[in-house]
Amino acid sequence: LKLQGKTLPWVGIDIGGTLSKVAYFEYYENGDNIKYLGNNHTAVQDFIKSTHQYGSDGERDARLELKDVQLGSRKGNLHFIRFPTSRMDAFFELAEEMRAKELLQKKVYATGGGAYKFDNNFKEVLDLQLVKCDELHCLIQGIHFIDANFIGECYYLKFSNDSAEPEKVTYDFQSACPYPFIVVNVGSGVSILAVRSSSEFERITGSALGGGTFVGLSCLLTGCDTFEEALELAAKGDNKTVDKLVKDIYGGDYTRFGLPGDVVASSFGSMILQEKRDNVRKEDLACATLMMITNNIGSIARMCAINEGIDRVIFAGNFLRKNNLSMSMLARAMDFWSKGTMKAIFLEHEGYCGAVGALLESLS
Ligand code: ADP
């Protein structure tokens, strides 16, 4: 199966600690690929496009589909699918059911830790060789490709006053000189990279307090069961009953160092008192958890940006999926603590950059 003398690319997979992400390229039919792909490919394509939901846990983000994109010498549509990595067994069952083993393609480009962990399963169940690609390299390549192919991919939040919903403003990353920038990838854990050119980047640091910590702690503290439920609770909550604020300690602002009274001095600091624990609502606990994780990520990101002398920080990863609260917190915190010199930039395809990067690797 060849394209320009290379294996035909149609799928890139990013198998993460929590979610597996798939970028599937549906290229336009022509005489050539009908000959190459035959009915199996058409069956897979029809199946993928027939629904948004695969089994109980797999989802296609149709809203994010990239239409009419050029990949190598082909044009087509790029689809985005995700499912929990914990359901990898169901994925293998489905693949067996669809007789995916008989597909002509024998190699798939994959990234993320699961490309190593599940290597044998892919070989045994699907007779598929996973070509492993570095996840951080894929992440950066994916960001560039999606940004070049999706209008409004990068954006920042503009606040007119304290109470209003922020406005989403497109950030033209291509026209502004794209380098250098910091990438903060918030998945199950956090990785922070400094990107200096298309081929030069380094992982500066990371944090184990990431999206997985938010979901895990929220489930323990509130009895909820999913990321979405935890976010819903957090949106209805108020952290002030859980955290100890500067004003709880000072009675107001700590003016000498410009710390407003409403700033959190100690996450969960009010929970040392039995009477406060007795009256706390689960919504408030979820909200305090979200704030603690988000603010911690924001301050590490800001310190990295200062150390590296870089003023643009791109936030990626599925922790920010549908997570307007954290995006607002990060944008406000970056702006406030940097006195307006740093910008937090967000992505529409926040969780899919690695999978797209893996797909692109199959072309190189
Ligand atoms: P990883 O590659 O480590 O799996 P992701 O970038 O996919 O990382 O992000 C995983 C994080 O995204 C989770 O820890 C959680 O905070 C958040 N998340 C968003 N949507 C979901 C979901 N449907 N199920 C589980 N976690 C989700």
Image: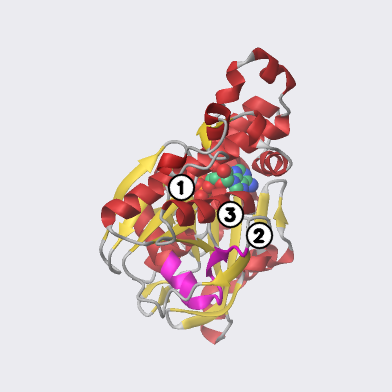
| Label 1 Cα crowd, 10 Å radius (few <14 / some 14-19 / many 20+) | many
User: Circle 2 sits in a helix, a strand or a loop, which is it?
Assistant: strand
Amino acid carrying label 3: it is Ser
Residue found at x 60% / y 67%: 168
User: Circle 3 sits in a helix, a strand or a loop, which is it?
Assistant: helix
Viewer-nearest of discs 3 and 2: 3
| Label 2 Cα crowd, 10 Å radius (few <14 / some 14-19 / many 20+) | many
Q: On the image, numbered disc 2 is attached to which residue?
A: 60
Q: Position of residue 100 (x, y in %)?
A: 57, 56
Residue found at x 57% / y 65%: 158
- Cβ of disc 1 within 8 Å of ligand 1? no
| Label 3 Cα crowd, 10 Å radius (few <14 / some 14-19 / many 20+) | some
Q: Kindly tell me whether residue 20 is visible in this rendering.
A: no
Gap between marks 3 and 2 measured at Cα:
26 Å
Q: On the image, numbered disc 3 is attached to which residue?
A: 328
* Chain part drawn in magenta: 143-160
Residue found farthest to the bottom = 31
Amino acid carrying label 1: it is Gly
